[in-house]
Image: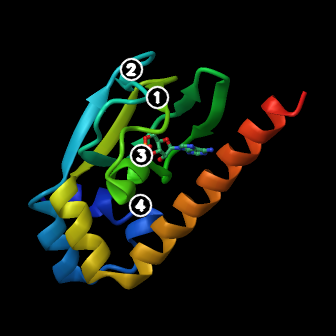
């Protein structure tokens, strides 16, 4: 339990949590191992969890190609939860990965309880949405 707690404390997104909030989160968060080149989910499928990268690298992609690579400390999967929409892109591992998995209910609880986390997640969501829009715009320009 303490080991997971210490690992959880290394995730930048969560660093404003209090000790009690960490302890409550630990009861609901899963640490899962994924091998390299594993498809975590495809674009367009329903989304029921957000992922925080403890170690490793993942690739975010759609039919136009790679949208981003994400590393230790980054997170993904927030868009489908915020929008209640299908996954906006596919995600696969590029290396062995350890990911914390937060289900929809826990994600909602965390957003509600911790405005500073909600703000960071919302900012990533807005930036990613704009980036993808710009990408699409540049592709269809010609
Ligand atoms: P979601 O739509 O749930 O599933 C795919 C995830 O990829 C998405 O949430 C974001 O977390 C992530 N994602 C989408 N577009 C980008 C981008 N341009 N840069 C980084 N991450 C992205």
Residue in the foreground of this view, choosing between 114 and 44: 44
Q: CA distance from mark 4 to mark 2?
A: 23 Å
The mark nearer the N terminus, 1 or 4, is 4
Q: What secondary structure is marked by label 4?
A: loop
Q: Residues within 10 Å of mark 3 (few under 14, many from 20)?
A: many
Residue in the foreground of this view, choosing between 138 and 57: 138
Q: What secondary structure is marked by label 1?
A: strand
Nearest to the eye among marks 1 and 4: give it. 1
Q: Which residue is mark 2?
A: 39
Q: Are marks 1 and 2 in contact (CB under 8 Å)?
A: yes
Q: Which mark is residue 53?
A: 3
Q: Which mark is residue 11?
A: 4
Figure coloring: rainbow
The mark nearer the N terminus, 1 or 2, is 2
Nearest to the eye among marks 4 and 2: give it. 2
Q: Is mark 4 within 8 Å of ligand 1?
A: no
Q: What secondary structure is marked by label 2?
A: strand
Q: Are marks 4 and 2 in contact (CB under 8 Å)?
A: no
Q: Residues within 10 Å of mark 1 (few under 14, many from 20)?
A: many
Q: Which residue is mark 1?
A: 90
Residue 53 x %, y %: 42, 45
Q: CA distance from mark 1 to mark 4?
A: 23 Å
The mark nearer the N terminus, 3 or 2, is 2
- Compared across the picture, whether 125 is left or right of 113 comes to right
Q: CA distance from mark 3 to mark 4?
A: 8 Å
Q: What secondary structure is marked by label 3?
A: strand
Nearest to the eye among marks 3 and 1: give it. 1
Q: Residues within 10 Å of mark 2 (few under 14, many from 20)?
A: some
């Amino acid at each position: 339990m303490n080991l997971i707690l210490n690992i959880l404390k290394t995730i930048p997104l969560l660093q404003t949590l209090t000790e009690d909030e960490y302890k409550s989160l630990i009861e609901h968060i899963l640490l899962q191992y994924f091998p390299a080149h594993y498809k975590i989910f495809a674009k367009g499928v329903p989304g029921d969890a957000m992922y925080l990268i403890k170690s490793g690298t993942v690739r975010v992609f759609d039919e136009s190609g790679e949208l981003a690579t994400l590393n230790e400390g980054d997170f993904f999967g927030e868009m489908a939860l915020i929008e209640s929409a299908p996954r906006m892109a596919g995600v696969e591992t590029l290396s062995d990965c350890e990911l914390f998995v937060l289900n929809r209910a826990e994600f909602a609880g965390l957003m509600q309880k911790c405005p500073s986390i909600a703000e960071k997640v919302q900012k990533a969501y807005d930036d990613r949405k704009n980036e993808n829009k710009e990408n699409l715009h540049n592709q269809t320009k010609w």
